């Protein structure tokens, strides 16, 4: 189980890094094509936008595991009741993710025949990022809740000090 | 009524440390469900659409460029450069802090990233030369607010989403206000350090004047590329960000050879994660703004302001006090995406130029980053220096006055914001 999670983290991180590298390359390429060859390519912007969404949603999942999401931080670290209250908030986050994930799934399933503007890719493919990432994120959030309630919140993988 | 319930829910969720993005998203969903206006599919589509924007591509690229340059060790180069110029005069290192912040602002768009990067270099240096750690910390966070005001700026990229303002025009509009803040901070240093002992610089090997200048030149070219490229119409703000990344890769991997493959992977990974945490806030905050628009809150707010006053000066005063309050509690990105769509139509009704208004809002919210109880940069500098928020806040007191003077000047002298973009032909 633990090695599966580590493998998944590695894969997601690789996807994040590659996406960012591709975004940088194609947009720089676009400047060259337009400025030096006076012929802009039709697809770099759309590809880059889809990859940015991939980064955002997959990164959302990774940020849960690493406790990197932006939020307030004022309650005592070791208080049991603070942990309970935080866990309640996270449970609501899980509800949000399930709802959006479900909506994203319906959205993707309705868009198999809707091609994107430039790449002519079925819109279902970029839309599928939403339910997939929400599913992974729900698991990460439930794991965090479990850690909070069992009092091992200090042992988060790669936790960021504020 | 519905809006009141939703806002109460938001306050509660933020108080129990629910991550901002999801607190805002949950409230938007609650609002849409109460008013029976949305379902799961529409919400997911709105979230997707809120993030699917060409302008937002500048976000990961500016974050990446900033992180690359910091990993490549440019902070030390910039600090050395500033040090050989002003390091010898009384309070020298305090001026170095401001100048380094100003130069970093030209390549980085994030006040928080600059606080972390400069704080870890400047504070130990200043401590070694007998400045108080609290003063050094307070000066660093105050200087770092220039980063999103001078181009490039992540905050401006986000501001352009709901308002559809030209990012290029905002970039130019920020230059003079950013320099003004630096000058006022320098004036304060001249006063605060008037009795600081002149100490011989002995804490690191001295490099020659020419060598230090030469080392900083490639970094200082970067802002020229951005500003010049956007001004000349060579590239959009987003493409400027991509070009800046390529330039940063060239500098750090080829010229300085200070970043290896493993570190490069790490920089890309951290940049992608930072991007994601900001983008999720952007997505859910646009969902929230959509709910407010359906509830017709922007028009109600305009009407409310017009019933309070018909004087643009009074309006700006009200907006400033309100945003200073908001900024003390809410992070910059949600504050902009939620409140700007409400405030900007009102500002336009009062005859205030939207570009000028954007600079006022941004400067204001940047002060909020340094203000307790929720000041992101205060948390960062506090964890770097190991000093308590309370101690740093105490040292910040006179600097708040300086920043409020800057805010008042920027608010009531539109010329400061509008002259450069007009000269550059980016606005009428």
Image: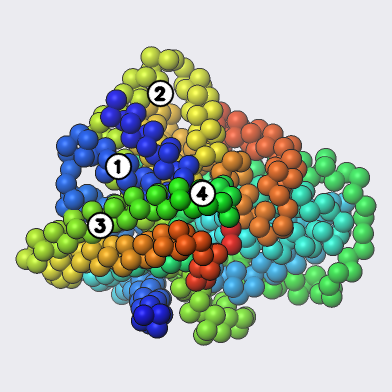
Same chain check for tags 3 and 1: no
Instruction: Identify the image quadrant of residue B14.
Output: top left
Give above or below for B269 relative to B394. Answer: below
| Chain on which label 4 sits | A
Same chain check for tags 3 and 2: no
| Residue at the limit of the structure toward the left, as seen here | A113
Dot 4 falls on a residue whose secondary structure is helix
Label 1 belongs to which residue? B28
Give above or below for A104 relative to B260. Answer: above
> Residue A82, labelled with which disc?
4
The N terminus of chain B sits in image quarter: top left
Give above or below for B181 relative to B107. Answer: above
Q: Is residue B35 left or right of residue B71?
A: left
Query: Are circles 3 and 2 on residues that touch, CB within 8 Å?
Result: no
Dot 2 falls on a residue whose secondary structure is loop
> Residue B350, labelled with which disc?
2
Of marks 2 and 1, the one in the foreground:
1
Query: Are circles 2 and 1 on residues that touch, CB within 8 Å?
Result: no
């Amino acid at each position: 189980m633990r090695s599966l999670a580590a493998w998944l983290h590695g894969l997601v991180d690789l996807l994040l890094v590659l996406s960012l590298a591709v975004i940088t390359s194609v947009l720089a390429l676009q400047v060259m094509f337009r400025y030096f060859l006076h012929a802009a390519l039709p697809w770099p912007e759309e590809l880059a936008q889809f990859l940015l969404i991939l980064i955002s949603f997959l990164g959302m999942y990774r940020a849960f595991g690493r406790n990197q999401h932006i939020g307030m931080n004022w309650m005592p670290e070791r208080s049991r009741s603070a942990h309970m209250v935080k866990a309640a908030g996270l449970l609501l986050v899980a509800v949000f993710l399930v709802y959006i994930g479900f909506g994203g799934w319906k959205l993707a399933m309705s868009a198999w025949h809707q091609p994107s503007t430039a790449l002519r890719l079925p819109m279902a493919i970029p839309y599928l990022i939403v339910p997939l990432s929400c599913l992974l994120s729900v698991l990460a959030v439930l794991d965090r809740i479990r850690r909070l309630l069992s009092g091992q919140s200090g042992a988060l993988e790669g936790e960021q000090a504020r | 009524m519905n809006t009141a319930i939703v806002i109460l829910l938001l306050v509660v969720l933020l108080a129990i440390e629910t991550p901002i993005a999801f607190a805002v998203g949950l409230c938007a969903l609650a609002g849409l469900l109460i008013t029976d206006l949305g379902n799961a599919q529409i919400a997911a589509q709105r979230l997707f659409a809120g993030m699917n924007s060409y302008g937002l591509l500048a976000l990961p690229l500016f974050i990446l460029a900033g992180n690359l340059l910091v990993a490549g060790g440019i902070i030390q180069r910039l600090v050395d450069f500033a040090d050989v110029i002003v390091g010898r005069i009384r309070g020298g290192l305090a001026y170095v802090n401001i100048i380094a912040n100003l130069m970093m602002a030209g390549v980085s768009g994030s006040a928080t990233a600059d606080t972390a990067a400069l704080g870890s270099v400047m504070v130990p240096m200043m401590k070694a030369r007998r400045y108080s750690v609290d003063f050094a910390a307070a000066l660093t966070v105050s200087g770092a607010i220039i980063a999103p005001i001078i181009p490039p700026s992540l905050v401006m990229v986000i501001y352009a989403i709901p308002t559809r303002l030209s990012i290029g025009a905002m970039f130019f509009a920020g230059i003079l206000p950013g320099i003004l803040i630096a000058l006022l901070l320098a004036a304060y240093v001249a006063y605060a350090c008037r009795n600081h002992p002149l100490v011989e610089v002995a804490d690191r090997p001295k490099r020659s004047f020419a060598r230090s200048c030469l080392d900083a030149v490639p970094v200082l070219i970067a802002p020229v590329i951005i500003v010049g490229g956007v001004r000349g119409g060579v590239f959009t703000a987003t493409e400027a960000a991509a070009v800046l990344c390529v330039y940063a890769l060239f500098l750090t991997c080829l010229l300085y050879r200070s970043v290896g493959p493993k570190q490069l992977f790490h920089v890309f990974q951290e940049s992608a994660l930072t991007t994601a945490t900001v983008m999720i806030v952007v997505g859910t905050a646009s969902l929230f703004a959509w709910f407010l628009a359906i509830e017709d809150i922007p028009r109600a707010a305009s009407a409310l302001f017009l019933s309070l006053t018909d004087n643009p000066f009074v309006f700006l005063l009200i907006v400033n006090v309100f945003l200073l309050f908001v900024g003390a509690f809410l992070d910059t990105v949600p504050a902009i995406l939620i409140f700007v769509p409400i405030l900007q139509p009102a500002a336009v009704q009062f005859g205030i130029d939207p570009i000028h208004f954007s600079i006022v809002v941004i400067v204001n919210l940047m002060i909020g980053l340094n203000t307790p109880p929720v000041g992101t940069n205060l948390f960062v500098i506090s964890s770097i220096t190991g000093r308590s928020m309370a101690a740093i806040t105490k040292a910040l007191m006179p600097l708040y006055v300086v920043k409020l003077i800057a805010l008042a000047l920027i608010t009531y002298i539109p010329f400061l914001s509008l002259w450069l973009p007009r000269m550059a032909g980016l606005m009428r």
